[in-house]
Image (cartoon, grey):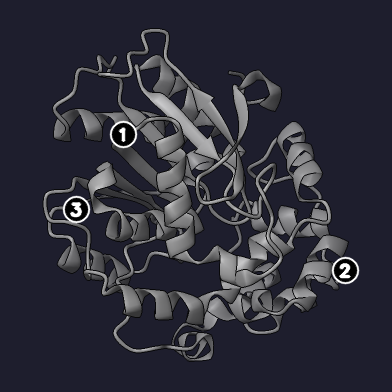
Amino acid sequence: MDPANPASFNHRTELLSTGRRYHFVDQLPTNYDPATTKTIVCIHGFPDLWYGWRYQIKPWVDLGYRVVAPDKLGYGGTEKPEDAIHYTSRRISDDIAALMDLLQISKAVIIGHDWGCFMVSRFALWHPDRLLALVLLSVPYVPPSKEYISLEQMVERFPNWGYQLHFREKSTNAEIEKHLSKFFRLIYRRRKNKNSPLRKWTLPGGLTEVLNSNAILNDTGFLTQQEFDYYMSQFNENMNGPLNYYRTTHYRFQEEKDGGLMPAPRADLPVLLVVGKDDPTANQGALEVTRKLIPQVKIELIDGVGHWVMVECKDHINESIPRFLQNTLSSNVHTKL
């Protein structure tokens, strides 16, 4: 399991009971025992892959956990339906449950980052009995809304979400594919200059301006050149699926309304939220909402770290999450921490 070599991981592609074919990495510890080994299921965000967990898989397997990391629907080697209705949180949650069924895992530790964070928080509502613990990376908990709030209304409240209006448009597929290298350099860049004109890509209309500008992004940011090349190979002419998640706002609201979801995960579920202090996604108000709705949550704020916590502070993530699990789960997993 070499992070620099994607082929060194154990890859599988299987048809789930939901009718969708998923690619995933399934890594077993040397002392694997289906009766006692705990499984960690890792759900990535945008724009990412199973590969987003490359620095976590081996350390956690070495601690005795089974680690499963799928490409979400629309990504990498997983099926890529054309229509956005297939990408709702209920359907993705059902896919996660079906993947666990396929692997004969009744309950697991479920971890998500970015969009994956939102999906696993909904998995905790749609399939509450399938979790041993819930770990949220970078994105605080957002409860189901009692009333429909359009994306336009959300952007009025939070202008930095303006890029989501852009992502919602089908024309964005071709625009990003045309500038794919620049887009990934922009997304994974190191944000040292808070006044950089590149920061305005999050504002309404800003992404088109940045992608079509003469702004030069020479380095690959948090990615090594090998990692960057792998991402390029996986996303070439393949942005419709990833962007479809931004086209599900009304579908998700209707599902949650019809499903009568609870406002928060079950009260006895161990929950950890890890956030980089330099990540604009997690403001103080959002953290307070999480604390109010999930009183048992443990929140870790990491100085000098932004959005890509699995890479930016990989050692902290690799050690902190198993420590949290060790402290909250009665487990037969022997760890080195």
Which residue in the protein does label 3 denote? Answer: 297
Q: Nearer the viewer, residue 139 or 10?
A: 10
**Earlier residue among tags 3 and 1:** 3
SS for callout 2: loop
- Between disc 3 and disc 2, the foreground one is 3
Which residue in the protein does label 2 denote? Answer: 214
SS for callout 1: helix
What separation in Å lies between label 1 and label 2 (alpha carbons)?
A: 41 Å
On residue 320, the disc is 1
What separation in Å lies between label 3 and label 2 (alpha carbons)?
A: 45 Å
Q: Tell me which residue sits at (17%, 32%) in the image.
A: 329
Residue 195 showing in the rendered view: no
Crowd tier of the residue under label 2, counting other residues whose Cα lies within 10 Å: few below 14, some 14–19, many 20 or above: few
Of all residues, the one furthest to the top in this rendering is 31
Residue 122 appears at what percent x and percent y? 35, 61
Residue 41 against residue 79 in the figure, above or below: above
Mark 2 belongs to which amino acid? Asn
Side of 236 where 335 appears, left or right: left
Q: Tell me which residue sits at (32%, 46%) in the image.
A: 135
Mark 1 belongs to which amino acid? Ser
Residue 134 appears at what percent x and percent y? 29, 46
Q: Nearer the viewer, residue 181 or 18?
A: 18
Side of 227 where 299 appears, left or right: left
Mark 3 belongs to which amino acid? Val
| Cβ–Cβ under 8 Å for marks 3 and 1 | no
Q: Tell me which residue sits at (45%, 18%) in the image.
A: 28
Side of 247 where 7 appears, left or right: right
Crowd tier of the residue under label 3, counting other residues whose Cα lies within 10 Å: few below 14, some 14–19, many 20 or above: some
What separation in Å lies between label 3 and label 1 (alpha carbons)?
A: 14 Å
Residue 276 appears at what percent x and percent y? 41, 52
